[in-house]
Amino acid sequence: MSTTLPPTTRLPEQAWKSEPISEPDYLRNKRGIMSWVYTLDHKRIGVMYLIGILTAFLMGGVMAILVRTELLSPSRTIMGPDAYNHMFTLHGAIMTFLFIIPSIPAALGNFILPIMLGAKDVAFPRMNLASWYLWVFGAVFLIAAMALNGLDTGWTFYTPYSTTTNSSVISATLGVFILGFSSIFTGINFIATVHIMRPKGMTWFRMPLFLWSLYSTAIIQVLATPVLGITLLLLIAERALGIGFFDPKLGGDPVLYQHFFWFYSHPAVYIMILPAMGVISELISTFSRTPIFGYRFMCYSAIAIAFLGFLVWGHHMFTSESAMAAVIFSALTFSVSIPSGIKVFNWLATLYKGSISLTTPMCFALSFILLFTIGGLTGLFLGALATDIHLHDTYFVVAHFHYVMMGGSLMAFIGGMFYWWPKLFGKMYSEFWGRISCLIIFIGFNWTFFPQFILGSRGMPRRFYDYKPEYQGLHVISTSGAFFLGIGLILCAAVFLHSLWRGRRAPANPWGAATLEWQTASPPPLHNFVDDPVVTDPYDMADFELQRDTGDYVRRPYTPSQSDGTETQS
């Protein structure tokens, strides 16, 4: 009879024994820079995405620290008002378009999705490589705005200011336009891969929830991103050629730009958060040793979030639309909280009576649930018309956005990094320092952004360089928290880097997880699997046994039943 292993036997601290490798792994199969430049291997493309995305995150993070430092005191602290406008604009644009949107799908998704499907690669490897180069070119154009005249429009590029300012709007928007093509290519590839490359036995409702989340995200990428691309082309045409689309002086309508922009950008919120929800589903199930609760509802809720995300863009414009439109969008905003709530309650139900291991990935998963819940609940205040009028364009919006995007997407991204790091690079990391980094990040995050809820409720407007002296105390608290958060992120990076040089060798399945990527070596060989993987229930982990000499988990062998000839567990 199957039993769940006690938690004390799951994660041994002794060094792993070396295992013979029958085929070179993807990192050592071919050497030299050109083998990476022209690679069609989804794993190497995922690693290149990871390096680029983390570089963008570093840039955006440094800008965030500079912005918070400036806000330590009213008026000038370390920079003038123009430099401040450029800094917070580039922080928002880099974090949104270069980091959060592509982080989980492009980096972790590119690496894990084909292996989780038991496939050799994605459906269109050359399109996958093209998407990476489009991301690089888009990043170059966006960051070039810093070297030219800067960018001071805010990351939303609102008209008519974006058509009249002297900053580098065309360079930045052209960069975002190119990044949109990268996102579309990735989405098409993921949809095709899930449809045509699932192995025999993996039906739609035997797919891991991470695949469901990437599939739902890909639908949004393919359908919503062209709207942003067309909108930015119209903005470029108006700015360069004087054609009146959005500028009232030219016969245009600036509110039309807001409709176009948010028709993409609110679904883009779910491009950021849906993959994060998929990561959390994997972590919660694996480290509670419990099959995911309400699996089908989790699948349907992912599709529901993708669908409803297209219907709520108007809640960003409650102050600039008719009363009837505001009421309709408010009701739709509350409706999208239903599938999100289903996921949160199902994660909690999965944890209930589970055999929970507080590993580093699990610590980040639990942090995600708390922070995302706070972000979601504060979103109800912004979805209600009576309270939104007061809170609109205040620091309450800044705090809500960061609790959902950073407390959600970033925490899940880091948790996914810790979870799949042994598979990506074949190295284990220090669990102690990983947990410490999670604790510091969690405390620093709340220390930074929770005071901003209070600032916003007291009327502090966002994006302002100067402010009244009575707001200074909360700004000082928020800025000191930002430095503490930065320490946590630096420690997290140090844990990863230390593992690459000094980490113990990772076994194929250090967590005892049942999804297919753990059936191959760590790191995987060039074509992912030496032997064809066996499709099983992705959340049936009861029959794994720990091999103490290697630190690996393997399934107990099947033996024929003496009574009826069917296979049973020994």
Image: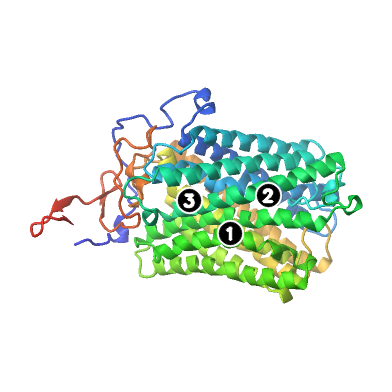
> Would residue 167 be visible to someone looking at this image?
no
Which residue is identified by label 2? Answer: 227
Left of 38 or right of it: where is 454? right
How far, Cα to Cα, is label 2 from label 1? 27 Å
Name the secondary structure under disc 1. Answer: helix
| Label 2 Cα neighbours within 10 Å, binned few <14 / some 14-19 / many ≥20 | some
| Label 3 Cα neighbours within 10 Å, binned few <14 / some 14-19 / many ≥20 | many
Query: Which badge, 3 or 2, comes first in the chain's sequence?
Result: 2
Percent x, y of residue 124: 49, 36
For the residue marked with disc 1, what is the amino acid? Gly
Q: Measuring 65% from the left and 46% from the top, which residue is drawn there?
A: 226
Q: Are marks 2 and 1 in contact (CB under 8 Å)?
A: no
Percent x, y of residue 358: 41, 59
Percent x, y of residue 173: 74, 43
Query: Which circle, 2 or 1, is nearer the viewer?
Result: 2
**Which sits in the foreground, 557 or 228?**
228
How far, Cα to Cα, is label 3 from label 1? 14 Å
Q: Which mark is residue 416?
A: 3
**Which sits in the foreground, 198 or 87?**
198
- Give the residue furthest to the left: 562
How far, Cα to Cα, is label 3 from label 2? 30 Å
Q: Which mark is residue 407?
A: 1
Q: Measuring 44% from the left and 67% from the top, which residue is drawn there?
A: 346
Left of 63 or right of it: where is 166? right
The quadrant the C terminus occupies is bottom left
Q: Measuring 58% from the left and 46% from the top, which residue is drawn there?
A: 102
Name the secondary structure under disc 2. Answer: helix
For the residue marked with disc 3, what is the amino acid? Gly
| Label 1 Cα neighbours within 10 Å, binned few <14 / some 14-19 / many ≥20 | many
Query: Which circle, 3 or 2, is nearer the viewer?
Result: 2
Percent x, y of residue 64: 70, 51
